[in-house]
Image (cartoon, helix red, strand yellow):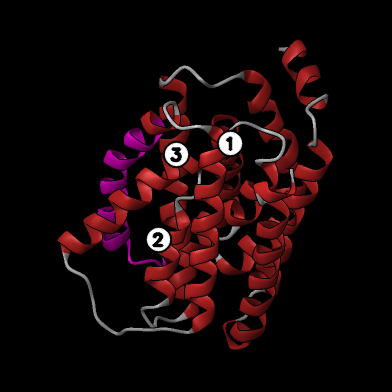
Amino acid sequence: MPDALTAALATNGLIYIALTYLVAGVVRGFTGFGTALIVVPVAGIFLSPAEIILMIGVTGILSNILLFPEAWGKADRGEVGITALAACIGVPIGVALLGRVDPLAVRWVVAVAAFCTLVAVISGWQWRGRLAVPGLTGIGLSAGVLGGMTALSGPILIIFYLANARKPEAVRANMILFLGSLDVLLIANIWIAGTATWKIIWVGLIVSVPYLFSIRLGQALFDPARETAYRAAAYAVVAGALLTGLPLWE
């Protein structure tokens, strides 16, 4: 275990990953999402896709200690339950694909997914319908596959909820519960696949220190009445992380 901690502290780019988590925590605290969209493009410069997924899972589980109590009473738990159950099928598929796809290709998938999410939510496109079980199942399954392959479970759900003209607190609560359940699934499947290492678990624990601190800050800043300003700031941070992590710069 001490050797794993020593290796974690020597991880290339650890300081940059930790600083990225510091920013991502503020965004996650007041929006309920955004961690993977911000962290994955930057972490992809230093870590393999499997390592990133494990790290995201570790930090996600710890963050849920702060986020779950507030979100539980505000979320549509039935709807989240359906999408999460469907994601249980999708995550193993994504993890299986991860071992068969070139890491550079995975990074491009991350970049395209993050870009499409950003464009969709910035555009302001909305619809006011409600999806039945088949539609929710499809969304959860798709999110699980993408999450298992790239750690980006959120984009599909983000587009769905933000485009559905719901109140900010409802969107935030639903995203917190769904992403929390996905974190557990991601760690379990990475462990079963045999690609989990104690070094990366320690990396996740280390970067969780600034992450949890900044989540508290984001929670304190959250105010549904100032949704426009918060979304604009979150979009700017995500766009900056996306540009930074593009494989074009290497």
Q: Residues within 10 Å of mark 2 (few under 14, many from 20)?
A: many
- Position above or below: 17 against 202: below
Which residue is the site of mark 1? Answer: 58
In the rendered structure, find residue 149 and report the number of the disc placed on it: 3
> Answer yes or no: do the residues labelled 3 and 2 have beta carbons within 8 Å?
no
Q: Is residue 171 left or right of residue 57?
A: left
- Determine if residue 164 is in view: yes
Circle 2 sits in a helix, a strand or a loop, which is it? helix
Q: Position of residue 188 (x, y in %)?
A: 43, 29
Which of 118/112 is in front?
A: 112
Give me the residue at 65% from left, 58% from top.
Answer: 242
Residue type at mark 2 is Ile
Among the two numbered marks 3 and 1 on one chain, the one whose residue lies closer to the N terminus? 1
- Asked if residue 46 is positioned above or below residue 177 in the image, the reply reads above
Residue linked to disc 2: 156
Q: Nearer the viewer, mark 3 or mark 1?
A: 3
